[in-house]
Amino acid sequence: MAALPPISISILDDHRLFRQGIMYILQSLYFDTKVQEAATFGELLDQFAQQVPDILLLDLQMPDINGIEATKRLLEAHPSLKIIVLSMHSTDDFISHMFKLGVRSYLPKDVDKQLLSTAIGAVMTDGYYFTDSISKAMARGLHASSPKQPSFQSAAIALTPREIEVLALICKGYSTNKIAEQLFISDRTVEGHRKSLLEKTNTPNAVTLALYALKHGLLAPDSTNTPSLQ
């Protein structure tokens, strides 16, 4: 992975030992990090008044606020904040709901160094990161909320065959360069298709585009059984 500039990270968790464990991992990563910790949402807001970090590692079970409300309030005030959830909650509908709110990744609370490093790097460079299990949970959650699944391209959006190919790879989390290599086209052409897809679906980024594709059945059944977003 390419070198990253120094990253500022905040940790919100009410368990001191967990915060210390995460801080230890962060300090041993291959990129430079500036880390601060908060035990309460109020303490975090005080820190944000001084400096808003690049990334927030958010525990969903806090004594003074729940994770959904914290996410809503923080992203309303700081839209560019990249939130990575660390939680033991893994129900499909809850996970998909958190991504709809705008979180960038969702990791198990017993995350190891390699996974956390990969997630932070991907969030900083690509804007989001999904594990295979989480992306499948998102797909199941979306399917459960729509009992009658729309047929292929039923959302009345006209996509070209090439746009469908690019969309399938975006839903697997492929970078622009990887998509270009896979389809034997230039990075610039990929970006053109990505822009067109965002405009046609009226979505702001790759995460919401992938969610839209899953919800509205924009992928052919044989393109991927469950788009992995990874």
Image (tube, rainbow, N blue to C red):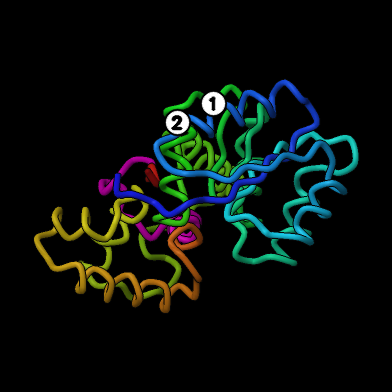
**Quick check: is 211 in the magenta stretch?**
yes
Q: Residue at x 90, y 41 (%)?
A: 64
Count the labels in the image: 2
Residue 37 position in % (x across, y down) = 72, 39
Q: Are marks 2 and 1 in contact (CB under 8 Å)?
A: yes
In the rendered image of this protein, does residue 18 appear above or below residue 192?
above
**Residue 150 showing in the rendered view:** no
Residue underneath mark 2: 115
Mark 2 packing: few (<14 Cα in 10 Å), some, or many (20+)?
A: few
Q: Outermost residue toward the right? A: 64
Nearest to the observer: residue 228 or residue 59: 59
Residue 4 position in % (x across, y down) = 39, 51
Nearest to the observer: residue 220 or residue 165: 165
Residue 105 position in % (x across, y down) = 54, 44
**Quick check: is 162 in the magenta stretch?**
no
Q: Quadrant of residue 220?
A: bottom left
Amino acid type of the residue tagged 2 in the rendering: Leu
Mark 1 packing: few (<14 Cα in 10 Å), some, or many (20+)?
A: some
Q: Residue at x 26, y 68 (%)?
A: 163
Q: For the residue labelled by badge 2, is the local secondary structure a helix, a strand or a loop?
A: helix
Q: Quadrant of the C terminus?
A: top left
User: Which residues are the magenta region?
Assistant: 210-226
In the rendered image of this protein, does residue 133 appear above or below residue 43?
above
Residue underneath mark 1: 111
Mark 2 and mark 1: Cα distance apart in space = 6 Å
Q: Quadrant of the N terminus?
A: top left
Nearest to the observer: residue 118 or residue 187: 118
Amino acid type of the residue tagged 1 in the rendering: Val
